[in-house]
């Protein structure tokens, strides 16, 4: 099935590769992906009514059960709402669950804009700097060791995918060390932010950027090891801001030099 303008590989696959998840591809996920992307991309505008089930069944050539399950999933993500005698309406964007991994992936599949990456960075700064501070207060010795080991693996990475995988591992370890289960709930957002940033511009391709990125992550790990909440906050803020700046700069260069 052709996805999003003929792209060979969609963002969900890339996120799965980085995070180690195995995403099963079946009729349900195919219908879900196509309809979700069509909504997020504006092919089905906010406030519009989706085509009737008969038309969608003919388009996707799936059973009514598969279609209904896909529509239920989209409704759970806040993208649509079924109304008797009206049809299935596309909800306004402020109703969408932007923390959902699929909704984020559909945005990324469009080609993330600088403003969207900035919004991701702002949310991460708002949450992850406190996760780092809590980790400094609550971490165990084993958790501190995991953070330092993840930084070493980042330094030794040879490909963008390998680096991004270890970076994601690092940020998940910080969330775990915080001892707050809500911190781990934003893992999909962190995965998407890292996937977007490293797809656009990976520090692995630039020795100076790699050294700087590893250094700031090592500073986070060391602050957590030393149980310094303030240093952990500041180092995490720098890490997120630098990642956004690198990706945004690369996007601006590509736009000015197509």
Image: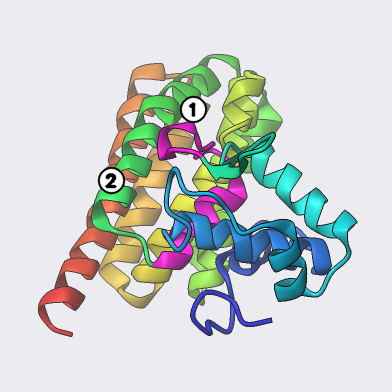
Name the residue located 73 percent from the left edge and 58 percent from the top edge.
53
- Name the secondary structure under disc 2: helix
Asked whether residue 221 is in view, the answer is: yes
Q: Position of residue 152 (x, y in %)?
A: 54, 56
Q: Position of residue 218 (x, y in %)?
A: 43, 44
Furthest residue in direction top, as rendered: 137
User: Label 2 vs label 1: CA separation?
Assistant: 26 Å
* Residue nearest the viewer, comparing 99 with 47: 47
Name the residue located 53 percent from the left edge and 38 percent from the top edge.
99
Residue 200: name its quadrant: bottom left
Give the residues in magenta: 91-110
* Residue nearest the viewer, comparing 28 with 114: 28
Residue placed under numbered mark 1 in the picture:
224
Which labelled disc corresponds to residue 84? none
Against 75, is 7 above or below? below
Residue placed under numbered mark 2 in the picture:
118
Q: Position of residue 26 (x, y in %)?
A: 83, 68
Residue 126: name its quadrant: top left
- Magenta-colored stretch includes residue 3: no
Against 38, is 8 above or below? below
């Amino acid at each position: 099935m052709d996805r999003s303008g003929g792209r060979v590989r969609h963002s969900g696959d890339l996120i799965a590769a980085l995070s180690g998840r195995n995403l099963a591809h079946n009729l349900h996920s195919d219908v879900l992906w196509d309809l979700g992307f069509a909504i997020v991309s504006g092919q089905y505008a906010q406030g519009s009514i989706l085509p009737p089930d008969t038309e969608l069944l003919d388009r996707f050539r799936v059973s009514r059960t598969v279609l209904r399950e896909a529509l239920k999933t989209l409704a759970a993500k806040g993208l649509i709402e079924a109304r008797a005698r009206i049809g299935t309406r596309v909800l306004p964007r402020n109703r969408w669950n932007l923390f959902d991994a699929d909704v984020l992936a559909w945005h990324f599949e469009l080609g993330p804009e600088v403003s969207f990456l900035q919004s991701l960075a702002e949310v991460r700064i708002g949450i992850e700097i406190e996760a780092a501070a809590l980790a400094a207060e609550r971490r165990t010795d084993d958790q501190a060791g995991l953070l330092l080991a993840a930084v070493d693996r980042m330094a030794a990475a040879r490909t963008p995918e390998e680096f991004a995988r270890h970076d994601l591992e690092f940020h998940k370890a910080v969330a775990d060390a915080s001892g707050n289960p809500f911190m781990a709930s934003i893992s999909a957002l962190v995965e998407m932010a890292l996937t977007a940033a490293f797809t656009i511009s990976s520090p692995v391709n630039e020795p100076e950027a790699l050294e700087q990125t590893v250094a700031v992550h090592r500073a986070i790990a060391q602050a957590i090891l030393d149980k310094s909440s303030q240093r952990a906050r500041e180092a995490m803020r720098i890490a997120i801001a630098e990642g956004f700046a690198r990706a945004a700069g690369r996007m601006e260069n590509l736009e000015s030099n197509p």
